[in-house]
Amino acid sequence: MRVIISGGGTGGHIFPAVAIANSLRKADPSVEILFVGAEGKMEMEKVPAAGYSIKGLPVAGLQRKLTAKNLLLPFKVAKSYLMAGRIIKEFKPDIVVGVGGYASAPVLWNAQAKRIPCLIQEQNSYAGLTNRTLAKRAGKICVAYDNMERFFPKDRIVFTGNPIREGFAVTTAEAKAEGIAHYGLDFEKKQILIIGGSLGCRTLNRSMVKWIEEGCPGGENVEIMWQCGKYYEKDMLAFMQGRNLPYVHLSAFIDRMDLAYAAADLVVSRSGASSISELCVCAKACIFVPSPNVAEDHQTSNAMALVNKGAAAIVKDAEAEEKLMSEAMRLVNDAAALRKMEKNIAPLGIDDADERIVKEIFALVGRKKQA
């Protein structure tokens, strides 16, 4: 079987795509997989690192600000469409899987025109424009949230959850002890994990800076793992220079996120689809600070899907510097509130989403071959 997996742009698209590929290989070691991504985006580095071949397209997204780059967009899309057509002609896929992101559109348009089966994996609770358009001719749409018939044909929706990276599981006492030991934390303190992604999150970093400048109110029995991101590492290290704060552990990158989750009593994070899926599987109490800089404000929709079930708390990005850390201190010291969140988020965790999606891929290919 030959499979093209297309999409990317962010870790939220790439991690599920690689998880699907890994599960395909596990189910059928003879499967041939080709990724198609966007030139200059992180998939061009992450996918080969995971052991897969990838081809890049010059496609790009529409810039929100008025810029000359938007004038070049139609030409990039046209060139990408032609390149995608050649890739499909040469590779001859049995199926094309779209995971969202710029590159998926020209690839799936070509595949659909050639009547090649297509499957779409939509990570978010508010579907993006690309996937909404492509879904009209897709064989299956795999989703991770309820009520997605707002965006897609109901008869082709399959609830699978979002594929996540390997190693994540519901936190046990043993896993928590291993996480605390791995990061050299204090067993007697409450642990907060603040994660801003690989590049970092300015809002979360500014919230921490303000809290530290104010004397760390409420943090007497709290320890913090603060992942600031490589983009902000230099500035945050300079800020921490000379400050005697042994209970604040600053790093640009966290090497074992599974153990960091396990150690944490509370996680503060953006509400991208992949992060939410991992937190659900680990059954972690969390505060989400949705990014306002995403299409259709989908991170707020993602977060509210959990907040409405009593499975998470939310602080608006614009209010985070004033409110986030005080809310985190209040919550981490409220054992009953933490247990309630953990109890409510646990049923939302799906740890076999990749296998569910692969099952749908095989079904679509089998149906095509039978025809």
Image: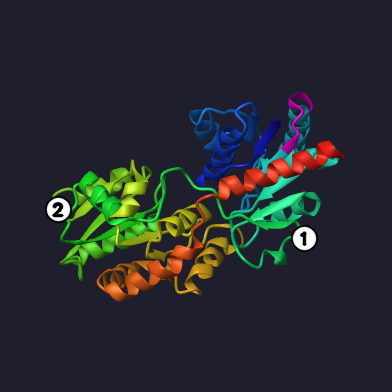
Residue at left offset 36%, top offset 61%: 268
Distance, label 1 to label 2, CA atoms, is 55 Å
Which label sits in the foreground, 1 or 2? 1
Q: Dots 1 and 2: beta carbons under 8 Å?
A: no
Vertical arrangement, residue 84 with respect to residue 200, above or below: above
Report the residue marked by disc 2.
Answer: 246
Q: In the depicted view, which residue is nearer to us: 324 or 79?
A: 324
Residue 151 image point, x, y percent: 71, 63
Q: Is residue 94 magenta?
A: yes
Residue 205 image point, x, y percent: 33, 56
Answer left or right for 363 relative to 184.
right
Q: How is the image coloured?
A: rainbow
Residue at left offset 71%, top offset 46%: 119
Residue at left offset 69%, top offset 48%: 120
Which quadrant does the C terminus fall into? top right
Vertical arrangement, residue 311 with respect to residue 113, above or below: below
Count of numbered circles in the view: 2
Residue at left offset 57%, top offset 62%: 298
- The amino acid beneath tag 2 is Pro
Residue 79 image point, x, y percent: 75, 33
Report the residue marked by disc 1.
Answer: 155
Residue farthest to the right, as pictured: 371
Q: Is residue 267 magenta?
A: no
Vertical arrangement, residue 250 with respect to residue 4, above or below: below
**Which numbered disc flags the more N-terminal residue, 1 or 2?**
1
Is residue 149 among what the camera can see? yes
Which segment is the magenta one?
A: 89-95
Q: Please tell me whether mark 2 sits on a helix, a strand or a loop.
A: loop
Q: In the depicted view, which residue is nearer to us: 101 or 188?
A: 188
Residue 229 image point, x, y percent: 36, 46
Which quadrant does the N terminus fall into? top right
